[in-house]
Image: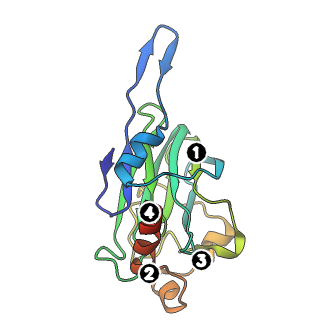
């Protein structure tokens, strides 16, 4: 586990065990993850998305509490996975970190409750799996426009982002803050503290 520059995000890189049949790896280990984040990951839902090159999904987040922690892996192809600190009052508010997730390295990105998540499909087709700490709840889910110039997310210059109508209509970070949609850093810290017991 490697801590990212945004508090609450970690990259997991598994040990790959190849042989003449293929490769074996432990894609998720609850004890390794909880050792890094300091509490149990309560798996409630797994999502799979299939996207073509240039697709950008996000920036997505959920109301805290309870929020939605995610453990994201690229099962086929490669993506640029981005975590955005949208927690009002955080020392890194408005900042981001990015990790390339691939089906060769089999690495994963964990994002704590209250962080924003987005990715861009880099290969012709990608399959992404998300382990989630809470089930999808439409009324508690929100988004920020992934091409908000004030965020300056690092989408490759040669890719024209393909967005869903919902993501294309999402507000900027500033507009989401003005509308009171963003979680507070204090609420997120308090929620994580309850998870740690």
Please name whichever residue, 164 or 36, is drawn nearer the observer in this view of the structure: 36
| Mark 1: secondary structure | strand
Rounded to the nearest whole Å, what is the CA distance between mark 4 and mark 2? 20 Å
In this view, the residue farthest toward the right is: 138
Rounded to the nearest whole Å, what is the CA distance between mark 3 and mark 2? 19 Å
| Mark 2: secondary structure | loop
Q: Which residue is mark 3?
A: 170
Point out which mark residue 128 bears. 1
In this view, the residue farthest toward the front is: 197
Rounded to the nearest whole Å, what is the CA distance between mark 1 and mark 3? 22 Å
Please name whichever residue, 79 or 132, is drawn nearer the observer in this view of the structure: 132
- Residue drawn at (50%, 56%), measured in percent from left and top? 119
| Residue 137: image location, x then y, percent | 70, 68
Rounded to the nearest whole Å, what is the CA distance between mark 4 and mark 1? 31 Å
Q: Which residue is mark 2?
A: 184
Q: Is residue 87 above or below residue 12?
A: below
Q: Quadrant of the C terminus?
A: bottom left
Point out which mark residue 51 bears. none
| Residue 135: image location, x then y, percent | 67, 59
Q: Is residue 120 above or below residue 195?
A: above
Q: Which residue is mark 4?
A: 197
């Amino acid at each position: 586990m490697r801590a990212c520059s945004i508090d609450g995000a970690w990259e997991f890189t598994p040990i790959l065990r190849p042989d003449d049949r293929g490769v074996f790896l432990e894609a998720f280990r609850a004890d390794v993850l909880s050792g890094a984040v300091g509490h149990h990951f309560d798996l409630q839902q797994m999502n799979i998305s299939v996207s073509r090159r240039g697709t950008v999904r996000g920036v997505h987040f959920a109301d805290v509490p309870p929020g939605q922690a995610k453990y994201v892996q690229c099962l086929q192809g490669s993506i640029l996975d981005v975590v955005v600190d949208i927690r009002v009052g955080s020392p890194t508010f408005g900042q981001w970190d990015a990790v390339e997730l691939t089906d060769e390295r089999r690495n994963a990105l964990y994002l704590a409750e209250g962080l924003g998540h987005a990715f861009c499909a880099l290969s012709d087709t990608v399959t992404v799996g998300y382990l989630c700490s809470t089930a999808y709840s439409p009324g508690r889910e929100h988004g920020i426009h992934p091409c908000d110039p004030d965020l300056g997310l690092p989408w490759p210059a040669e890719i024209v982002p393909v967005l869903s109508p919902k993501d294309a209509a999402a507000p900027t970070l500033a507009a989401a803050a003005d509308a009171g949609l963003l979680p507070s850093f204090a609420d997120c810290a308090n929620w994580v503290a309850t998870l740690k017991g």
